[in-house]
Image (spheres, rainbow, N blue to C red):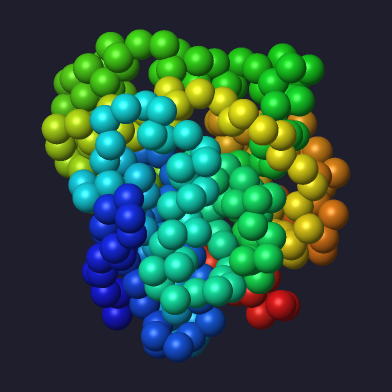
Amino acid sequence: MIDHISIPTEAGSFDAIAAGPEDGRPVLLLHGFPEAAVEWEHQVATLGVLGFRAVAPDQRGYSPGVRPEQASEYSIDHLVGDVVAIAGALGWPEFDLVGHDWGGAVAWWTADAHPERLRSLAVVSTPHPAALAEAMKTDEDQHLRSRYMTEWRQTRVTERRMLENDARALRDMFERRVSPSKVDDYVQRLSEPGALTAALNWYRAGRPGGKIGKIAVPTLYVWSTEDVSFGSTAALDTANWVSGPYRFEMLEDVTHWAPEETPEAVTSLLVEHLNAR
């Protein structure tokens, strides 16, 4: 059974889905754009059955209770701070962290800033930020894949284009690999006043001010061969940015939306990773 909970923090209350016993080993799962916590519903439910306490929050801008207007309020420092605040509100001094897409980026930065809080790290799709930054500079393929980030940072016209014609642009992002009912849910959420702008403010907040180092916590990185956003250069280079125990898994013929496109495969890898710690 999946429960819907609210997590109060100084920034506001985060909506979340949760499963498993309150005293189970804690696992926090971070979603990406343009999704929400329910992207992890298969993983949350399975982990709960296995005795973990799995919680996936709607992150800053996606939770109506934490939706500041200024783009600067969506900097990586704020997003990492939310992770720590959520874990604190849940009473978790140590936890396993999982992320996909933007949630994966936040997970990498959290592991760098707060390694003492993490028992392990698992990231789907998103390479280590330093590996991605280098690939964007040296690999033409990755540079082309990442052009959308620059476009979304520069103009507010993006919101109108994404939502026009029954949000066709938003729907097309999922490449018909996510169930139509789930896509309808995401579109409905992002059609709420201010919601899409809040989600895009993650891109508009500016690049992180500091540098990220090598990750010391045990790490699982899962990359899909058909990922439209992240190519093989950054994916393979990620190994050079983890100093702790590292496992790299490649999903053949799977797109960017792996947690929902192949939920069983992602869940199996995640459970193996957690049970090894």
Q: Nearer the viewer, residue 66 or 203?
A: 66
In the rendered structure, the answer to whether residue 233 lies left or right of residue 38 reads right
Q: Quadrant of the N terminus?
A: bottom left
Q: Is residue 226 left or right of residue 248?
A: left
Residue furthest to the front: 10
Q: Is residue 36 visible?
A: no
Give the quarter of the figure containing the C terminus: bottom right
Quarter of the image where one finds residue 165: top left
The x and y percentages for residue 160 are 22, 17
Instruction: Provide residue 157's location: percent of width, then percent of height.
Output: 28, 12
**Nearer to me, 83 or 233:** 83
Name above or below for residue 129 compared with residue 245. Answer: above
Q: Residue at x 14, y 32 (%)?
A: 193
Quarter of the rendering containing residue 18: bottom left
Position of 36 compared to 147: left or right? left
Residue 142 horizontal/vertical position (percent): 67, 22
Residue plotted at (19% across, 20% down): 164
As drawn, 246 above or below 63: below
The reply to whether residue 128 is in sight is: yes
- Give the side of residue 15 with respect to residue 46, left or right: left
In the rendered view, tell whether residue 120 sits above or below residue 136.
below
Identify which residue is drawn at 63% across, 66% down.
Answer: 118
Residue 9 vs 32, above or below: the answer is below
Report the label total.
Answer: 0
